Image (spheres, rainbow, N blue to C red):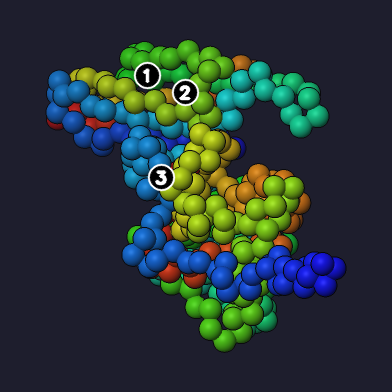
Amino acid sequence: MKRFAGATLIALIPACSAPPAAENATEIAAEDIVSGSIFLTAETRDLQEDNFANPGYLWVDRGEALFSKAPASGEACITCHEAGLSGVAATYPAYDEKAGRVLNLEGRINQCRVTHQSEPAWEYESEELLSVTAFVANQSLGAPVSVDVSGPAQDIYEAGRDYFQTRRGQFNLSCQQCHTENWGKRLRGDTLSQGHGNGFPAYRLEWESLGSLHRRLRDCDLGVRAEPLPYGDPLYVAVELFLAARSNGLEMESPAVRR
Amino acid sequence: MASIRLAVPDAANVGEVIEIKALIRHPMESGHRRGARGEVIERDIITRFECRYLDELVFAADFHPGIAANPLLTFYVRASNSGTLDFTWTDQHGTAWSETSALTVT
């Protein structure tokens, strides 16, 4: 009997160990990828599409003013970017040669500010940075998300994907479990979205304010009772890159309105 | 710091009813909420909005704590003569923000 018991135990070990990562890595089929605005009520979607009443445009207006105003030292953004930045935001996050790392739109704006305007970088989630980011992102309204994850961005993309697929927090949930495997189902009073970032910076009704994607990611991390990363953390930028690549082809909606 | 967005037509016919939209950036803190440490977040709201057309009061609204942040108002005015429309928001401390828009009536 003892020998049989031992054999059973050995046989059980492989069955109990975690399945290989590849088995968990499900993806949303390309034809099923939809923007977060699909999950909004008709009224909220109308608010987003009304480019007067959409409160996100309060920040876009402010951003436009900051974009045209010369800081104490250096030239105004518009001096270099006279032709506008149409479609540019749709390619971010992107690998930046000068910085030697992947920058998101906020990071890129701050890089311009430090190197070309000799001004201190704006604090992440500050009114100024949010406003200019919203103004630049808004110029890509309707453009398809098209980030490049080849070459030096590849490692960062993979780091972002790993973060997305890793269970965390007291609830022991990964981003993927909600936003890839169970999107469209109900979670408490809400419908799970696919977790795309194409509307950010977005005006969230819950915040009664515009906020960055990192603020949203922090909310999700807090939601599963995990320790959120600081604003602008390179790992969040990696997640941002992964999310953008995952939503390649979706139309940019910033400033979107979200619940 | 207040930013204001106005949607007012530049021109209208005599007697025409025009739609006006006015949006202002304001937290409209109700005074009923509590912060992370349980302290009451002080009330901070706009209490009055007025629209004057040719110096005559044509629309006014009293705001209360139930109004959401960044309030948007849509209302209608009948165009009579060319002139300015003055919009004023006043908060509970008496601070006021104003914006003006010119209307040509033909």
B34 and A166: which one is in front? A166
Is any atom of residue A81 visible in this view?
Answer: no
The residue depicted at 47 percent of the width and 51 percent of the height is A183
In terms of image quadrants, where is residue A162?
Answer: bottom right
The residue tagged 3 is: A39
Q: Amino acid at mark 1?
A: Arg
A201 and A169: which one is in front? A169
Q: Quadrant of the N terminus of chain A?
A: bottom right
Q: CA distance from mark 3 to mark 2?
A: 37 Å
The circle on residue B52 is 1
Q: Residue furthest front?
A: A1
Q: Is residue A140 left or right of residue B104?
A: right
The residue tagged 2 is: B88
- Mark 2 surroundings within 10 Å by alpha-carbon count, few (fewer than 14), some (14 through 19), many (20 or more): some
Q: Residue A172, percent across and down?
A: 70, 52
Is any atom of residue A148 visible in this view?
Answer: yes
Q: Earlier in the sequence, mark 2 or mark 1?
A: 1
